[in-house]
Image (cartoon, grey):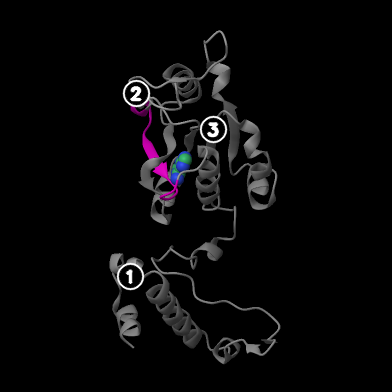
Amino acid sequence: MKITVLTLFPEFFDSFTNTSIIKRAIDNKHVDFSSVNFRDYTLDKHNNVDDTVCGGGAGMLLTCQPIVDAIKANRQKDTKVIMMTPQGAPLNQQKVHELAQSDDVIVLCGHYEGFDERIRSYVDEEISIGDYVLTGGETAAVVLCDAMIRLHDGVITTTSHEDDSYENGLLEYPQYTRPIEFEGQKVPDILLSGHHENIRKWRLKESIRKTYLRRPDLLDKKELNKEESKLLSE
Ligand code: ADE
């Protein structure tokens, strides 16, 4: 997968791309990541990329020319152009799966008060990471890129994300490692029983319980199968 981030702060992505799993994914060529400064594309003689708002109002807006030229210079025929903005569609695991299907994405990060509205006609998807406003799209872009990259084959062991929270519309069940007892808290006996089918059922039940208690909205959206419906009613 190729990811090109268009940003005023390419260095923001240095620690993201130089750490842990993402670094390994890049080193192993699962992902080709670059961050490009769209200021490099401005034709303004003072190197500006923003201007005052037509009709008046506080703050500055990112202008069309540098961003649209940066998009045009970095996109191929099948590139998906994604804009990070609090006005976008909410990011969830299903959306991450959808976006991670693309082999080539441009992720556009805004700053200042926002984008000239006409830039949106060069964008395929607008994505928000939540109902709050960040100082810039970079933090949101890191969230999106991380979530997409980890889904790629070989980036993490394939079985480890199947049980992740949200993958099956439920929160993840509780997990434990050694010691078997820590300051009076014990690992549930069933997990030490070696009985795989009982462990599977316990985990599913705990997943449903946790989701019911913490995120009942997820259960409203999920189509429960027979076993899940039975466990929910217990
Ligand atoms: N830029 C500023 N706030 C944002 C948000 N919540 N999601 C995506 N991009 C943003």
Which residue does the image show at 57% across and 11% down from the upper left?
A: 46
Q: Position of residue 140 (x, y in %)?
A: 51, 44
The CB of the residue at mark 3 lies under 8 Å from ligand 1 = no
Q: Which residue does the numbered mark 2 point to in the structure image?
A: 118
Left or right, 12 with respect to 209, comes to right
Choose the circle earlier in sequence order: 1 or 2. 2
- In the rendered image, the quadrant that contains the C terminus is bottom left
Q: Are marks 1 and 3 in contact (CB under 8 Å)?
A: no
Q: Nearer the viewer, mark 3 or mark 2?
A: 2
Choose the circle earlier in sequence order: 3 or 2. 3
Q: Amino acid at mark 2?
A: Arg
64 or 204: which is nearer to us? 64
Which label sits on residue 168?
Answer: none
Quick one: SS at disc 2?
helix
Q: Amino acid at mark 1?
A: Leu
For residue 183, above or below residue 93: below
Quick one: SS at disc 3?
strand
Distance (Cα) linking label 1 and label 3: 36 Å
Which label sits on residue 4?
Answer: 3
For residue 211, above or below residue 13: below
Q: Are marks 1 and 2 in contact (CB under 8 Å)?
A: no
Q: Are marks 3 and 2 in contact (CB under 8 Å)?
A: no
Distance (Cα) linking label 3 and label 2: 21 Å
Distance (Cα) linking label 1 and label 2: 39 Å
For residue 75, above or below residue 90: above
Q: Position of residue 204 (x, y in %)?
A: 43, 78
Q: Nearer the viewer, mark 1 or mark 3?
A: 1
Left or right, 154 with respect to 231, comes to right
Left or right, 36 with respect to 208, comes to right
- Which span is picked out in magenta? 120-132
Q: Position of residue 149 (x, y in %)?
A: 55, 48
Q: Which residue does the numbered mark 1 point to in the structure image?
A: 219
